[in-house]
Amino acid sequence: MGGLAKEILQGAARGGYSQGMLQTVLQGGAVGEVSPFRDTYLKAFRFMLLARILDEKFASLYRAAKIHGGVFLGRGQEALSVSVGYSLRPGDVFAPLIRDAAGRLAFGEPVLDSVRTYLGSPLGPMRARDGNVHRGRPEAGLLPMISHLGAMISVVNGVLLARRLKQIPGSVGAACVGEGATSTGSFHEALNQAAVEKLPLVLVVANNQYAYSTPTARQFACDSLLDRAQGYGVEGHAVDGTDLEGCLKVLELAVARARAGNGPQLIEASLLRLCGHGEHDTAEYVDAKLKASSLGRDCLKIAEQSALHQGWTNSETIAVWRAEAVQKVEDAVAMVQREAGPDPFEESWQALSTRDLSEGNE
Amino acid sequence: MSITYLEAIREAQARALADDPRVFIYGQDVGAFGGAFKATKNLAAEFPGRVLDAPISEDAIVGLGVGAAIEGMRPILEMQFADFSTVGFNQIVNQAATLFWRTNLPCPITIRLPFGGTKGGGPFHSQSLEAIYAHYPGLIVMTPATVEDAYSMLLEAVALDDPVIFCEHKLLYYHLKAEQLPTEAFPVGKARIAREGRDMTIVTYSAMVHEALEAAGELALEGWQVEVVDLRTIKPLDTDTVMASVARTGRLLCVGESWPWGGSPPK
């Protein structure tokens, strides 16, 4: 994965991201010429750290009533999420879900995109038309989710099929869902569709044990969601979602197999959501036994301990990274808080690109 | 030579495929079989790899169409019957109809809905859903009444940068004929005066245009001159033409096939 930062920057530039913003995301750190995996691991860890700090800032802005609407965090899912974003390359397609701040950053989304969306800045990618988590840059391969779970999977299929029709080889599309989404008709239709067309889809299921408040026992009756891979005729991979190394390796494998023409890949990552469904949710329903189990481990802490244990970095360096990430987030928030909000009287309310056919022009 | 409403739809798709490499067709049984109504007859052979059979998955059919449109394609999606589009409703109204508003990226997809009552169709193969889709600001809803409009409006639907719900009436498929395909057409969104009259205006669309014209013919024998307005598109609604007609006649009758409560005629 050498040169990934450069690739992200190239992809971002191609997709319209500001290179400067991405460089601030990626600059700094002490990445030496040791093992390539050490390099990958530490870069992924830094995205996790940045995502956690960004999420915590949003939670604090939410509690201060500076954010209107819900705030949804990825606490406990950063290892999995970052691995998805990190395993993709420029030209690939990514449909993240509500807990994928880490994956979005690793895919190349600037910190400013999320800050501007949450704070309702018209300069953000959604131009203040859609707050919270529904942001994206479809022209750059980052698809903006709708709230209806499972609905983005077939959209990824469509991009991939179009690439096939246009004879553009080598693209992979990743879609993230939770275990709750596996109960939807959309999930079933889309995974079956991808299997029939043998599309290079990587479908990542974060089994975080609760869909809002509903435990897995009320969500499905099979022993493992991975059992379904065989039913759909696709390849399946299980992974401990609290383990960064495992997540990076399984995503690298699945993406490589999809890219090589082996059809859709289904990944089930077991972990625990270490926060409420949204910041409005105190999540008292989460089973204490699950919290105490290995599923309840904080992937960020484990990744840090592991990196220190391996001798890949030291506490001082991590403290510097943390301070840099905090500064990056604070700078972005301070900047966006000075930006003017949307003006409903200046806004075009037309829902069609063909202006003379839009409502109001009848 | 004569050409039917159904053949015009097939010919429009053939021309769209021939003229624009971004066009492809996706739907149930549309491939080698040629579609449940044969609206895609021989197209899979004429355009290899571009007319694709889909699993029975209306949600994923529309979702795939949106993804392909994001990637710059112009998919034509066939719902086997309009009734089954309700299974893909979420993708149509929440994904396709909001994409441009949310992202500034257009969503050029055409969704063909064979609709309306025919003998023996029953409750699940007869519905008229144009009013439901017209409710959403991000959708255009076309309801062609003639062979010429079926052809030219379908080509317009594919050419437009926005999602179009193309309602083609099954009753017109086989019996409605024209001598030849049109070479020019009314602009999209403009209604047509199908028959001029001074005593009353009937505003209608699709198959009911022909019922209205027949009624107008009978009333003419009694001395009443009835004007018939063919809306052509439900959304946008050409209120200018309707109001101008009613201003002349002073009386308005709206005729449609959908359910009366919240249907298109009350609008």
Image: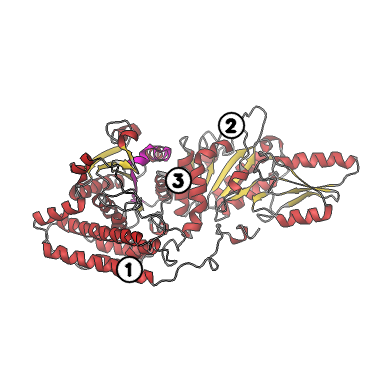
Question: Residue at label 2?
Answer: B124
Q: Position of residue B3 (x, y in %)?
A: 69, 40
Disc 1 residue crowd, few under 14, some 14–19, many 20+, Cα 10 Å: many
Of the pair A118 and B220, the residue shown nearer to us: A118
Q: Position of residue B27 (x, y in %)?
A: 51, 39
Q: Position of residue A246 (x, y in %)?
A: 19, 46
| Disc assigned to residue A332 | 1
Identify the residue shown where x is 63% and y is 39%: B128
Chain letter belonging to callout 1: A
Does residue B48 appear left or right of residue A276 in this picture? right
Note whether A104 is above or below B55 in the view shown: below
Give the distance between the C-alpha atoms of the residues marked 2 and 1, in whole angstroms.
Answer: 54 Å
Tag 3–tag 2 contact (CB < 8 Å): no
Identify the residue shown where x is 81% and y is 49%: B251
Q: Amino acid at mark 1?
A: Ala
Give the image's coloring scheme.
secondary structure
Question: Residue at label 3?
Answer: B64
Of the pair A104 and A77, the residue shown nearer to us: A77
Q: Amino acid at mark 3?
A: Leu
Tag 2–tag 1 contact (CB < 8 Å): no
Q: Which residues are magenta?
A: A169-190
Residue B23 appears in the rendering: no
Quarter of the figure with the N terminus of chain B: top right
Chain letter belonging to callout 3: B
Q: Amino acid at mark 2?
A: Phe
Disc 3 residue crowd, few under 14, some 14–19, many 20+, Cα 10 Å: many
Query: What secondary structure is found at the residue carrying circle 3?
Result: helix
Query: What secondary structure is found at the residue carrying circle 2?
Result: loop
Does residue B32 appear left or right of residue A332 in this picture? right
